[in-house]
Amino acid sequence: MTNDIHLAFAHPSERAAATANGPADRISVRDYIVEVEIGAFQQERGTTQRVQFNIVVEVQPIEGPIDDDVDRILSYDRVTEAITIELSEERLNLLETLAERVADRILLEPQATRCFVRIEKLDRGSGALGVEIVRSRPLKVVDPSDTLALPPLVVMLSNAAIGASHLKGWLDQLASKDAPVILCVGLPEGTPPASQVGPAQRRIDLLAIEQNAWVLAGCDPRCVVVATRTELDWAMKNGQICVWAPSKIVLDAVEGPATQPRDAVALNAWFATELEAAAYWVIGPDTPHAARSIDADQAQL
């Protein structure tokens, strides 16, 4: 174990060499800069900043001659692709989350054995603010039974449907289906507070929808309000009927919905598309082109 303090700020390639148990082949991507929206603070939303990546990947030595064959090595493009893919998945608050995901994706490559990832924000002060992680195989094993076999069914309930006497019957029918069920709602009755600032009004409307989601969830103990992808995955895998609280997923989306939250049918259609849902149904008076519309007094789904 080295006690050289300079290694704390050394390039990942130097740290890799200092902590190696034996000779290792390495590839590196240095000073790779992208413009991205990231950060937990309000002033970091709605704007991009420069983020710099330095990545070193230790790889298994190639057996036999390389023969100048690019298919036999771990390409630099696979490293930069890992960055691009993870940045495109969703808007992130933490560099730590991004570093973890980039490292995990790189370590999916069969040649990769250990990965050093340093990520720094270049525009948050006079210096570079960042994190560095080291990850090695074995990766976390994913149990195939943990993955969803069927895409979910997304169902929007109008306010009339939420208050209908048929609600329990509808939920019984939905719960009996093989596919996981995600319920969505729109704004509650009444007028939410108004703001002259567009982003503020968007948040107000999203929070109002979430209040309505809690009203729906309170109607049946099988319903659970979910706000994140992790909560959503867990609830569906455990047979719960999900009620979507949209704020976090909408605000963190790299390419969010073009519609405003007040157009709840379109907002929930965007969500269904993001999830690659098996179907999108609307129970209520609104009839979108992209959904099967069901009258609020119709009991059979």
Image (spheres, rainbow, N blue to C red):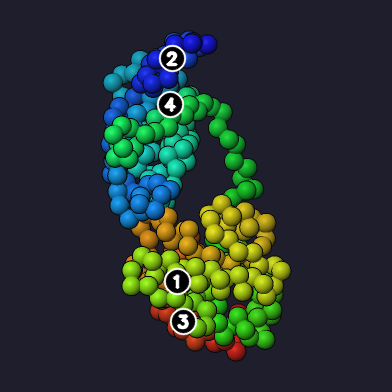
- Within the image, what quadrant is residue 15 found in? top left
Dot 4 amino acid type: Phe
Q: Report the residue at 53% width, 65% height from top.
A: 245
- Within the image, what quadrant is residue 18 found in? top left
The circle drawn on residue 284 is none
Q: Closer to the observer: label 4 or label 2?
A: 2
Q: Is residue 187 visible?
A: yes
> How far apart are the two marked residues, 3 and 2, measured between alpha carbons?
60 Å
List x then y, in percent, for residue 80. Answer: 33, 36
List x then y, in percent, for residue 120. Answer: 35, 34
Q: Is residue 51 visible?
A: no
Residue highlighted by disc 3: 191
> How far apart are the two marked residues, 1 and 4, measured between alpha carbons?
42 Å
**Going from the N terminus, do you reach mark 3 or mark 2 first?**
2
Local SS, label 4 = strand
Label 4, residues with CA under 10 Å away: few <14, some 14-19, many ≥20: many
Local SS, label 2 = helix
Residue highlighted by disc 2: 5
Label 1, residues with CA under 10 Å away: few <14, some 14-19, many ≥20: many
Dot 2 amino acid type: Ile
Q: Report the residue at 50% width, 83% height from top.
A: 190
List x then y, in percent, for residue 20. Answer: 47, 14
Q: Is residue 278 left or right of residue 51?
A: right
Residue highlighted by disc 1: 205
Q: Closer to the observer: label 1 or label 4?
A: 1
